[in-house]
Image (spheres, helix red, strand yellow):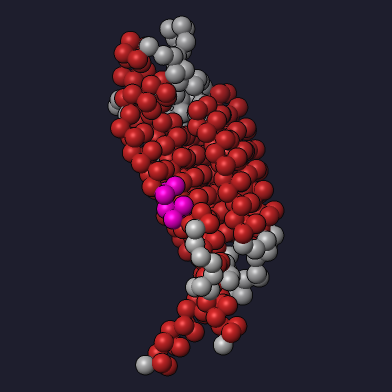
Amino acid sequence: MEELLFDLGFVLTHYNYWMFVVLMMTGLYITVSYGNLVKKIVGLNIFQTAVFLFYVSTGKIVGGTAPILTDDPDAVYSNPLPHVLILTAIVVGIATTALALALVVRIRETYGTVEEDEIIALEHEMDAAIGGER
Amino acid sequence: MSAGLIGIAIIDILLFLFLVLIAITIARLRNLFAIAMLAGVFSLLSAGLFVTLDAMDVAFTEAAVGAGISTVLMLGTLALTVREEKPVTHSPFLPLLVCAITGAALIYGTLDMPPFGAADNPVQTHVAPYYLEQTPVEIGIPNAVAAVLASYRGFDTLGEVVVVFTAAIAVLLLLGGGGRSGRHDNVAGERKKD
């Protein structure tokens, strides 16, 4: 019966890894497919959140509770270590997002656009102008 | 055990469907203001998913930092740049192909992962039991996450503070805090003059 079409137990214990892969790939698609720099950063944040969810889900114990210790001797606690690492990662993530957004503001001041293909076209124009002066 | 798994599965899948819908809407929208607000909603919903995974501290941080500060930074950037994305001209076929191949490879990798939520997974049998047992003895507070963050792995947190400090300095240098003398280096402006 277990061998029929798919193993339900296997799907139930692995589906959430697949969910995070789908989410991560949506973020990757937004990052690589669109030329607007702000939208790329939003895509990166989605990708990053998917990684966080995946990482925290490895520490989860079914029937367990948050790792805040109680007097109940039978309590099962989820693993606190992934939570700590992801706390650090979230704060580092906002720092890199802020840096990326500051770069976008500077790029807009210098090039007058935040669209990737227009920036590349301007760069080519500048290169051609420098080559022409020589 | 099984009933618990199915209960978690229903909440998980509902929250996840919302997350994917928001992500796809972000991909399709061209109004950057709407995208910034949806990114905030995305962070808040992922905080909900963190709660179902027992990570309360992570959920708090994600709600405050992801939905709060990140949205404010995003809106500030939009105020200084543009509000509307220009339409995409190239075909989406190649990025879709790359994402599909990467996703397939990752899913192939998860087939060897230990089952979700089992108490005897490798991740649960290493140092985590030590932290849970020794936190009340050595640190004397009930929250094991805070104990690991600030004491057992305090140097990691110091490294994090260094990273945030570096990023803050870099942002200040880039934006100049009003000390920069204006738009001398404006390529687009020079081009108009020519």
- Residue B127 against residue B98 in the figure, above or below: above
Of B103 and A133, the residue lying toward us: A133
Residue B131 percent coordinates (x, y): 34, 20
Q: Which residue lies at the image location 49% right of the left edge and 21% below the top edge?
A: A66
Would you say residue A87 is visible in this rendering? yes
Q: Is residue A84 left or right of residue B45?
A: left
Q: Which residue lies at the image location 42% right of the left edge and 53% below the top edge?
A: B170
Residue B34 percent coordinates (x, y): 69, 53
Of B13 and A54, the residue lying toward us: A54
Which corner quadrant holds the C terminus of chain B? bottom right
Of B102 and A119, the residue lying toward us: A119
Residue B129 percent coordinates (x, y): 34, 20
- Residue B187 against residue A26 in the figure, above or below: below
Q: Main secondary structure of the magenta part?
A: helix
- Residue A29 against residue A70 in the figure, above or below: below
Q: Which residue lies at the image location 51% right of the left edge and 54% below the top edge?
A: B177
Residue B135 percent coordinates (x, y): 35, 16
Q: Is residue A22 left or right of residue B147?
A: right
Give the tally of numbered discs.
0
Q: Which residue lies at the image location 59% right of the left edge and 55% below the top edge?
A: B77
Of B33 and B80, the residue lying toward us: B80
Would you say residue A115 is visible in this rendering? no
Magenta span contains residue B139: no
Q: Is residue B67 left or right of residue A68?
A: right
> Bounds of the magenta span?
B167-173
The quadrant where residue B10 appears: top right
- Residue B165 against residue B141 in the figure, above or below: below
